[in-house]
Amino acid sequence: MWEMFINWLSLLFLMVKDCAQCGWLQNPVMAEARLHINSFIMGSLFTVLALLLTLSQEKISAIIISQMVISIPLILFASLSYTKTGYERSHRIWYRFGWITNNLGYLLFLNSVGLMIIFFSWRTIGFLYFGAIILLASAYYFLNIASQPGTRKEHLLKLLLWIVVVVIGGVIPSLYI
C-alpha cells in the first residue's frame, strides 16, 4: 500500500506544472502572498491545537490530533519552498515540493476540522463538510481544465489527490469515531 502511495506521489510530483507556465518563475510577490496565507493557516492551527489540548486532552481522538500535528511541518516546509521559488534559479523543484507539501498540509488540516465536527456529535454537518470539500475541489479543478485545456491530466491527478486524502484521512476515520 505504501509503495503504491509513494509511486503515485512521485507521479504527481512530475505532473505539477512547470513554473514558467504557472507564474512562479522567480516571482517574489507571489511567493510572499503564499507566505501570508500559510502564516494565517499556521496561526489557526496552533490556536486550535492549543485549545484542544487544553480543554479536552483526554477525550480527543488521536487521528484528529495526529493529522493536525503533521499538517504543521508540511505547511512550514511548503512556505520555505515557496520562498525559494521567488529567488532561486532551481525554482521548478521548489515549486513542486511546495505544492505537494502545501496541499497535503491543507488537506490534513481540513480533515482534522471535519473529524472534530463529527467527534463533537455533529455527524451530518461533518459529512456535509467533507462533501463540500470534494465538491468545491472538483469545481476548482474542472474550472482550471476549462480555462487551460492542455492541463487536463495534471488537474485530474491533483483532484484525485484531494479526493483520496479526504476520503482516507477524513471520511473513513469518521465512520469509526
Image (cartoon, rainbow, N blue to C red):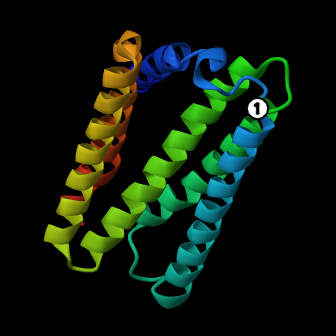
Say few, some or many: other residues with alpha carbon within 10 Å of mark 1 (under 14 / 14 to 19 / 20 or more).
some
- Which amino acid type is shown beneath numbered disc 1? Asn
Percent across and percent down for residue 175 are: 18, 58
Q: Secondary structure at mark 1?
A: loop
Quadrant including the C terminus: bottom left
* Looking at the image, residue 60 lies above or below residue 6: below
Is residue 176 at least partly visible in the picture?
no
Q: Would residue 121 appear left or right of 78 to someone viewing this image?
A: left
Residue at 41% over, 57% down: 110
Specify the farthest residue to the front.
147
Q: Nearer the viewer, residue 42 or 58?
A: 42
* Looking at the image, residue 125 lies above or below residue 58: above
Is residue 151 at least partly visible in the picture?
yes
* Looking at the image, residue 20 lies above or below residue 52: above
Q: Which residue is mark 1?
A: 27
Percent across and percent down for residue 54 are: 56, 87
Percent across and percent down for residue 81 are: 73, 36
User: Within the image, what quadrant is residue 50 found in?
Assistant: bottom right
Residue at 23% over, 50% down: 172
Q: Would residue 15 appear left or right of 59 to someone viewing this image?
A: right
Percent across and percent down for residue 37 are: 62, 55
Q: Nearer the viewer, residue 45 or 28?
A: 28
Q: Nearer the viewer, residue 49 or 29?
A: 29
Specify the farthest residue to the top.
150
Quadrant including the N terminus: top left
